[in-house]
Image: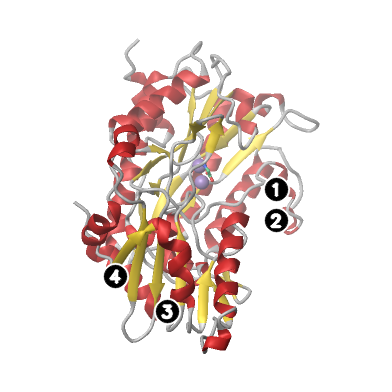
Amino acid sequence: MIDISIYRRRRALLAARMQSGIAIVPTAPERTRNRDSHYPYRFDSYFYYLTGFREPEAVLVVIAGAQPRSILLCRDKDPEREVWDGFRHGPAAAQERFGFDEAHSINSLGALLPDLLANQPTLFGHLGADSAWDARMIGWLNEVRARVRTGVAAPREIEDLHAPLDEMRLIKDAEEIAVMRRAAGISADAHRRAMRATRPGRAEYEIEAELLHEFRRCGAQAPAYTSIVAGGANACVLHYVQNDGVLADGDLLLIDAGCELDGYASDITRTIPVNGKFSGAQKEVYQLVLAAQAAAIAAVGPGGTWQQPHEAAVRVLAQGFIDLGLLSGSLDQIIETEAYRKFYMHRTGHWLGLDVHDAGDYKHDGQWRTLQPGMVLTVEPGCYIRAGEGVPEKFAGTGIRIEDDVLVTPSGHEVLTSAAPKSVADIEDWMRSRHE
Ligand code: GLY
Ligand code: MN
Ligand code: MN
């Protein structure tokens, strides 16, 4: 059962932040994959955040002011289409079930929008994501402008709808945190399952199948992003998604996979030994990345800045690169010149929520923003050592990343994904319990 008060509250907050004017929020279009096959449908994150409504072909209109109103436009009931494609709420049931002030057929969008835009001072929309949608918005605006001689005023200002919504989405409310905790738990279970399925001779896609199996078995609708299952040197390709290599005895396996549950992403990376036991050289690099992650996680808390976990990770990694003989020079110089980027070329995390790389600015007025309770971020340092000049043979082709999802709490932080084994001992113990 959907708790409509959550979505009502979010729409009321949006209206309050708009102060006046009208917001138009379309959901995502259905997309063709090839000929008449479609990609699995995924609603737009902003639209879903404000409605909880998952059907395609829907638009939300929010009118701010003394008496804010929210209006849904959605598909009509259509018994014949419903035989083929499944249930549709239709406007009347959608209004009731999702708590809108009004609901209409999506077919009346073109007729209704110019009337709703009339005499509104500001239009909140998002231009540039979909040119066909942009053209429709401009068309409705021009229709209102054409009526000026009848005494109607067209909106004079167009504001980016995402600005107020991004700030709202950045701070997760209790309902969102509850879903994200469940998503994180399912993904941790999927990693545990993948670890138990890993052994030399298996294909990367067989391990990917274990992840997907666990996601769906637990009710998650989809992976939140394409799973990375990268054996050996494939782990040095940051966005490796081919997943068709064969796992070799003595190699590591990097798995970056997380499910999407009820719209919310989780995002976990673990790096494990294919044969269940880290070699000495692998352990050296692994312990370094783990220490960098611990330092970064320790830097997550209210009042700290977005940048501090990254700086903490970089400091540990850079010193480690010196100690392992991968880089030479002073620590300060390696940080200053960013020489560490040869082995650690990405940032330490991103916001997480409805989108895996979630909404929200990282800087405010040129300053890294301050962490606040309710923010959720990933902490994912790594080390990628490609074979090459100056790289000790024993480290060549080693790619390691360790990634967890971290909630900022009033007293510090909570690691949402801690059920996925992470220390050398925990991973080896868990893998030892594999059935052959
Ligand atoms: N899996 C996407 C990321 O880690 O950012
Ligand atoms: Mn990530
Ligand atoms: Mn990831």
- Between marks 3 and 2, how big is the CA–CA gap? 41 Å
Mark 1 and mark 2 in contact (Cβ < 8 Å)?
Answer: yes
The image shows residue 79 at horizontal and vertical percentages of 27, 40
Secondary structure state at the residue bearing disc 4:
helix
The image quarter containing residue 408 is bottom left
Which residue is at the far left? 1
Asked if 191 appears above or below 52 in the picture, the reply is above
Secondary structure state at the residue bearing disc 1:
helix
Residue 243 shows in the view: yes
Q: Which residue is mark 3?
A: 17
Q: Is residue 200 shown left or right of residue 266? A: right
Mark 4 and mark 1 in contact (Cβ < 8 Å)?
Answer: no
Mark 3 and mark 1 in contact (Cβ < 8 Å)?
Answer: no
Secondary structure state at the residue bearing disc 2:
helix
Instruction: Give the mark nearer the N terminus: 2 vs 1.
Output: 2
Q: Which residue is mark 4?
A: 9
Instruction: Give the mark nearer the N terminus: 3 vs 4.
Output: 4
- Between marks 1 and 4, how big is the CA–CA gap? 46 Å
Q: Which residue is mark 2?
A: 335
Instruction: Give the mark nearer the N terminus: 3 vs 2.
Output: 3
Instruction: Give the mark nearer the N terminus: 1 vs 4.
Output: 4
